[in-house]
Image (cartoon, grey):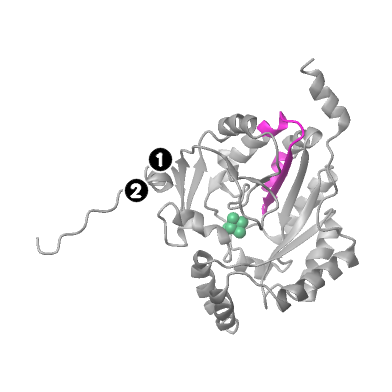
Amino acid sequence: MLFPFPAPAPLVGIARLAATSPRLEAKSQVEYFELESRSILNRCSSPRMPFPWTINPYRGCEFGCQYCYARYTHEFMGLEDPSLFENKIYAKARAAELLRRELRLHPEGEIALGTSTDPYQPAERRYRITRSLLEVFAGECGRRLGITTKSNLVERDIDVLLEVARRNALSINMTVTTTDPALARKLEPRAPRPDLRLAAVSRLAQAGLSVGVFASPILPGITDSESSLDAVARAAKEAGAGYLRSGLVFLMPSAQKQFFPFLDQQFPALAPRYRARFQANPYLRGEYAEMIRRRVARIRERHGLPSAPPDLAPDPAAEQEQLALFD
Ligand code: SF4
């Protein structure tokens, strides 16, 4: 043969596991797989993140937010096309068993559940991996756990969330980037509508859980106006959120692959400015960032919303109860 094809490079690590994962089912363009995992509690070394541990029950996320920074996690598995992040969903096998074992090895530190996937995306309705993890936390004492989602499916787990909150510091963060349903549909095409997310905030708060709203990411020229951010803050307050946090969008090259063509279609006037700014640096810094920081601080003050949950000391009576179990 004059031009032999080179033998494909052998797949290793997570790419090999992904390629050999058994398919669980397929729904329209979405396919679900079971991913054998070696661990579920991952150390987070990023200085930008305030927590040392993360848990992601799935790889990939069906909500398909245009700005999602987590698309790189599929690239690690050899899945380069950005659309595969929302169309090939991997459910982690034996997650609860792994968590029980790993919590014994790592007794301290805040844990963030749902940093590069939504723990309440549609797959959770069927596979219930997030719920199985919460059941493990319900048997723990003195942990600090934060859950971030865009889904009202979190309401399904109010019973087990209350159990977790009895002996652990638990906060639930509902992401609401905009209250405008048409804009949300463009930005977060398969996530629940903002009003459904806010209704979930209301039910969680009424149940006595600590719940706040994340107005993140803030997108320049799209969701960064005073009126847009104020509408999110007002709706959060009315729903009973205890705090409001926000963060500016950042666009790594894997996220740019999805977001720039989206801008070309939906916001063509903004596209060249985004390209110029984010190709030079994936993070927004300087004067603009400072102006937004002041704007959000002003809005939080107007609505009486702190930037973080109050110190969530676990109920001392519940702690005593737990200790009594070991007498
Ligand atoms: S919900 Fe979060 S993880 Fe899922 S696509 Fe949107 S930004 Fe990404």
Give the magenta part as a residue range.
135-157
Asked whether residue 1 is in view, the answer is yes
* Viewer-side label of 1, 2: 2
Residue 208 vertical placement versus 77 (above, below) = above
Neighbourhood count class around disc 1 (C-alpha, 10 Å): few under 14, some 14–19, many 20 upward:
some
| Label whose residue precedes the other's in the sequence (1 or 2) | 2
Q: What number of labels is visible?
A: 2
Left or right for 286, reference 226 = left
Location of residue 208 (image quadrant): top right
Left or right for 156, reference 323 = left
Q: Which amino acid does label 2 sit on?
A: Leu
Query: Which type of secondary structure does the marked residue at label 2 adopt?
Result: loop
Left or right for 84, reference 262 = left
Alpha carbons under labels 1 and 2: distance apart: 16 Å
Viewer-nearest residue: 199 or 228? 228
Residue that mark 1 sits on: 22
Location of residue 207 (image quadrant): top right
Instruction: Locate residue 19, reporting x and y percent.
Output: 37, 46
Q: What residue type is labelled 1?
A: Pro
Residue that mark 2 sits on: 11
Residue 133 vertical placement versus 278 (above, below) = above
Residue 147 sits inside the magenta stretch: yes
Q: Residue furthest left?
A: 1
Which quadrant of the figure contains the C terminus? top right
Instruction: Locate residue 103, reporting x and y percent.
Output: 64, 33
Instruction: Locate residue 41, reporting x and y percent.
Output: 59, 40
Residue 213 sits inside the magenta stretch: no
